[in-house]
Image (spheres, rainbow, N blue to C red):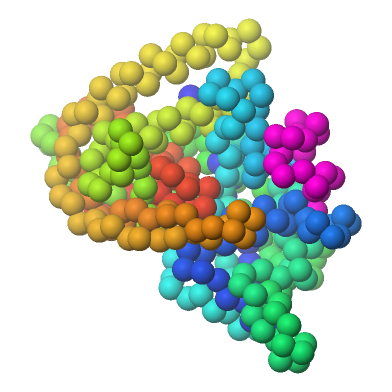
Amino acid sequence: MRNLTAHHLRFSLEVESTIELNEHKGSALRGLLFHALRGPEKNPALGFCVQRHLRTCAECSLVAACPVASLVSTLNPEAERGRDVPRPYAIKPPLDSKTCYEPGEPISFGLTLFGEALNLFPYIVMALRQAGAGGWGKKLPRPEKGGRAYRGRFSLQGAQALNLLTGEVQEILQPGNPLVQRPDLPVTETQIAEWSEQLLSQSTAFGANGHSSATGVLRGVGPGPVEISLEFRTPLRIIEQDRLLKEPRFGPLFHRLLDRLIALNREFCRVTPGREAETEAEDSLGKNRLLALSDQVELAANETQWQEVWSYSARQERRTPIGGLVGWARYRATREVWAELLPYLLWGSIIHVGKNAVKGDGWFKLEI
């Protein structure tokens, strides 16, 4: 890989007037982030888009220098697979079933920025500070406003940086303080390698889920097979040969994870000048070897179920299915195979895997 980093941020909002969200809060948070950065069409003083009359970022001549396009509507005309490239972030939404929030209640969510996307952090803070007054969520009737429907308002109260492996916390925005600290607790390639080695040798505590620490343990202490369990906390949606994957087989899961990780490295991590072709060749050779190893991993136990979830786009005025597998799956392979694959699984718990990763889907953690 190319020295990928992941900066995880935890934002705390306070509700000022009733906010009602749909069941999939990750989709609502992705919409909030997009509209906060873009800004309302009728108020050019808010947000950062300067050509809001255009339907898509692809039509804009300023796309290469725009924080909106760089983060939430990513385009790269020179990208290997076309202009659209993976978005350099992933949302970790609240996992509870609560959808209605009353004044004074908190809403907390996570946002992980990958590689050079950290440079856009100040835009995110400014956008969230501005967006609260414009409202968020479903339009609700307000009797005191003559029956007119309004979206609920909120204010940005604070933010933390959190290392998803070590659990270290850095206060970057505190209530009442206008100053914002630059996040400085990244997950790095070196940390991933160290934690992988520790997990293979002994039980060790680690926080790789954005909410709380968990103990990741590999079963089996001898030379025989070793088992790893993954908990899919949000729907895992993978398309294999034009069909939805309804069983969490390791091969397709790892293939999509590796594709996403390579793409994030390619687009958002710097390569030493003159080594571009060499690095691409290394990616290709390494991918083939890792996929061959992933075929040796068997599904030892499957306790997942399909969860049907829908996402609604106000801009497109339509619903789209984003459901997938949730629950537990246990995988078995030799310790030598896991020594090669475990670092990528740790990255997977951070970057998510499958479709709708930016909205929070495909979020898993390693557990007994």
Region in magenta: 47-66
Q: Is residue 243 above or below residue 285?
A: below
**Image location (x, y in percent) of residue 242:** 33, 36
Q: Residue at x 50, y 58 (%)?
A: 319
Residue 51 appears in the picture as rendered? yes
Name the residue at 55% across, 71% down.
21
Specify the quadrant of the image occupied by residue 155: bottom right
* Viewer-closest of 295 and 239: 239
Residue that extends furthest to the bottom in the rendered view of this protein: 144
Residue at image coords 34%, 53%:
324
Residue 89 image offset from top left, x and y in percent = 57, 44
Q: Magenta stretch: residue 143 in it?
A: no
Tell me if 165 is positioned left or right of 68 in this view.
left
> Image quarter for residue 340?
top left
Residue drawn at (77%, 87%), measured in percent from left and top?
A: 145
> Is residue 355 toward the left or the right of residue 142 in the image?
left
Task: Verify whether residue 53 appears in magenta.
Answer: yes
Tell me if 37 is positioned left or right of 259 in this view: right
Examine the residues drawn in magenta and state their main secondary structure.
loop
Judge whether residue 365 can be spotted in this image: no
- Residue in front for this viewpoint, 54 or 257: 54
Q: Position of residue 357 (x, y in %)?
A: 48, 47
Q: Is residue 219 above or below residue 333?
A: below
Task: Count the marks.
Answer: 0
Which picture quadrant has residue 348? top left
Looking at the image, the residue that sits furthest to the right is 45
